[in-house]
Image (spheres, rainbow, N blue to C red):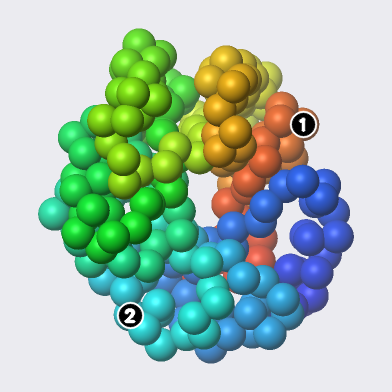
Amino acid sequence: MSITQKLHQITESLPPEVVLVAVSKTKSESEIAEAYAAGQRVFGENKVQELVRKWENLPKDIQWHMIGHLQRNKVKYIAGFVSLIHGVDSLRLLKEIDKRGAQQGRVIPCLLQVHIARETTKFGFDEAELTETIAMVDQGQLPHVQLRGLMGMATFTDDAAQIRAEFHYLKSLYDTFHSGREAFDTLSMGMSGDYHIAIEQGSTMVRLGSSIFGSRNMT
């Protein structure tokens, strides 16, 4: 099945309120161009250098999402154009994004990454840190950041009940902070292996790569 066929099959199956991020990391510009020609406009990358190169070379109406772990010293390279940063996993990183947003004269949309998985290798805020950080933004301390919502990655496991419980917990946190915050409208959870469960649990944005482009190119 071609990229175009896979993309159409997926988009037709998704609820209308769920945004599809096509994870294009390691994929060629020609593969992205095929997805673009099929109507896809939101793409996700996890390496800053690759993201910058693709942004420079591909159509300017693409919305580029930074979905990987972002180092603070790399924020400056994407601050001028990135549409959404998914993996904001610390207050220090959020402050750096705010600083670079000020330099660019723009407010940068962000999702706060919550640690919901059992693996210690995953990044993210815990509930107390989340509450404290959102309060800082509410108070206007980081004026060049717009908190759009939350993001999380479930444990890499075949145990659907565990994945469901982790997504359910993240949705409950999202509901708590969504109330009264108009711009706080995005819950990014679900990848190719578990997005059906994520949508069932209330995800509004899924990040799919191999389902669209086939198995990952290792780099």
Residue drawn at x 21%, y 39% as measured from the top left: 95
Vertically, is 123 above or below 52? above
Q: Is residue 142 left or right of residue 44?
A: left
Count of number-bearing discs? 2
Q: Is residue 53 left or right of residue 186?
A: left
Q: Locate residue 112: give its quadrant.
A: top left
Which numbered circle lies on residue 200?
1
Vertically, is 105 above or below 131? below
Q: Which of label 1 and label 2 is nearer to you?
A: 2
Residue drawn at x 80%, y 69% as measured from the top left: 8
Residue drawn at x 39%, y 25% as measured from the top left: 138
Question: Would residue 182 be seen by someone viewing this image from the given angle?
Answer: yes
The Cα atoms of the two marked residues, 1 and 2, are separated by 35 Å
Name the residue nearer the viewer: 153 or 219: 153
Residue drawn at x 50%, y 33% as measured from the top left: 150
State the image coordinates of residue 189 (x, y, percent, origin top left).
58, 38
* Label 2 Cα neighbours within 10 Å, binned few <14 / some 14-19 / many ≥20: few
State the image coordinates of residue 84 (x, y, percent, origin top left).
45, 53
State the image coordinates of residue 35 (x, y, percent, origin top left).
65, 77
State the image coordinates of residue 13 (x, y, percent, origin top left).
85, 54
Question: Would residue 125 be seen by someone viewing this image from the given angle?
Answer: no
Amino acid of disc 1: Glu
Which residue carries the number 2 mark? 53
